[in-house]
Amino acid sequence: MPLCYKIDILAALKEKGYNTNRIRTEGLLSQSTLQKFRNKQGISWENLETLCALLDCQPGDLIEFVKEDVQEKGEILP
């Protein structure tokens, strides 16, 4: 997956005082979104915006683009 999390999202939330119970109780993020963080899966723009607001950061602080090794796909590098 070319887009990857740069940090442990759940640990960063916990550091800011947002444990999973508080997040669910206050309706900040859904259980399925929390599970996506655990599985390192992508999230929606809306959830990314919420996350940036909670952590007081920019999207680039959370995610990065990692170029896939195209040789694994049988392609030739330029």
Image: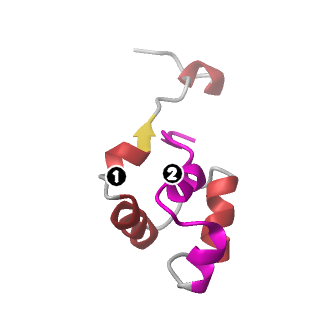
Residue 77 % position (x, y)? 46, 15
The residue tagged 2 is 12
Front residue (pair 37, 13): 13
Front residue (pair 18, 64): 18
Residue 6 % position (x, y)? 48, 39
Q: Earlier in the sequence, mark 1 or mark 2?
A: 2
Front residue (pair 20, 17): 17
Label 2 crowd bin: few (<14), some (14–19), many (20+), radius 10 Å:
some
Residue 14 % position (x, y)? 56, 57
Element type where label 2 sits in the image: helix
Front residue (pair 18, 35): 18
Quadrant location of the C terminus in the rendered image = top left
Q: CA distance from mark 1 to mark 2?
A: 14 Å
Q: Amino acid at mark 2?
A: Ala
Callout in the foreground (1, 2): 2
The residue tagged 1 is 59
- The segment highlighted magenta reads 1-25
Q: Amino acid at mark 1?
A: Pro
Label 1 crowd bin: few (<14), some (14–19), many (20+), radius 10 Å:
some
Residue that appears at 32% across and 58% down = 56
Residue 1 % position (x, y)? 58, 41
